[in-house]
Amino acid sequence: MTILDRIVDYKRTKELPCRMRDLPLEALRARAAVAPPPRDFVAALRSAPDVALIAEVKRASPSKGLLRPDFDPSHLAATYAANGAAAISVLTDEPFFQGSLAYITQIRSQLASHLLASDRPEVSLLRKDFIIYPYQIYEARAAGADALLLIAAILPDADLAELLSLTQAQGMAALIEVHDREELMRVLPLAPRLVGVNNRNLRDFSVNVDTCLRLRSLVPPDVCFVAESGIQTRVDAARLAASGVDAMLVGEALVTAPDPGAKVRELISGREG
């Protein structure tokens, strides 16, 4: 059983049944209905002058443990936004990544107060988790997310179509993640607005940025194309730009950087610091 299999099994058999019992679906849907309206996540990425940066708030990973000893999700998100990130991904899985759905609400409130005194637009927020049930989509909307991640590798075609439709009905964007050509061919008939290619191999967890570059030509230009995993330096970002990638999702390179703000500027400008 891979780590992905373990995560999904835990969600299905333990975590989500408990969450659904503690907050029934109807009560959750009522919360989602009165949440602040979602912002246009795709438009936020398209408005960037070059490769847009989706900067990730990520506390830990199953393989590396705690990534930042002084982890403060709201401060980290504010730093990303102040230095030019187009959007922010918030990893909300608790058992394996030490995340929290509450981070989205906290970050949205923090960013709103920070941006009141500036002329920068509000930064869009993506819920990054292992979403397998409609319940989690309502959770994302109730927390204030503008978009969420759907992973093709863990969703049968019918489930993926259902979850995409519900996400769109809630006014949110879905970043549909694929890992190879086969998964991409399953996803494209759904007419997605946003596709991400994860450069991490799910079998051995190795990373190769060439994965997304090989698949770029298969995705129509009107679909926003996001590169995920393995993006570490300005050289990586420049390769993505040269290949017509629209956006990059970067987590560990930012979270573990001594100066996350400087790392954001490096990635989006092609210059160190």
Image (cartoon, helix red, strand yellow):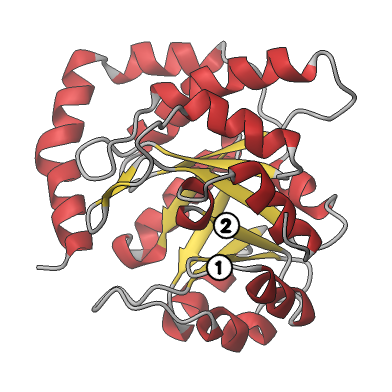
List x then y, in percent, for residue 52.
74, 56
In percent of the image, x 86 and y 21: which residue is there? Answer: 118
The answer to whether residue 144 is visible is no
**Which quadrant of the view contains residue 75?**
top right
Screen quadrant of the C terminus: bottom right
The one of 170 and 1 positioned closer to us in this rendering: 1
List x then y, in percent, for residue 137.
43, 35
> For the residues marked 2 and 1, what is the alpha-carbon distance in whole angstroms?
8 Å
In percent of the image, x 82 and y 30: which residue is there? Answer: 121
In percent of the image, x 76 and y 74: which residue is there? Answer: 241
Callout 1: helix, strand or loop? loop
| Residue on which the image places disc 1 | 231
**Which quadrant of the view contains residue 202?**
bottom left
Callout 2: helix, strand or loop? strand
List x then y, in percent, for residue 101.
38, 27
The answer to whether mark 2 and mark 1 are in CB contact below 8 A is yes
Label 1 packing within 10 angstroms: few (<14), some (14-19), many (20+)? many
Q: If you read the primary sequence from the N terminus, does the residue marked by circle 2 or circle 1 appear first?
A: 1
The one of 155 and 255 positioned closer to us in this rendering: 255
| Residue on which the image places disc 2 | 249
Q: Type of residue at label 2?
A: Leu
Tell me: 172 left or right of 258. Answer: right
Of labels 2 and 1, the one closer to you: 1
Look at the picture and state if 168 lies above or below 237: above
The one of 183 and 96 positioned closer to us in this rendering: 96
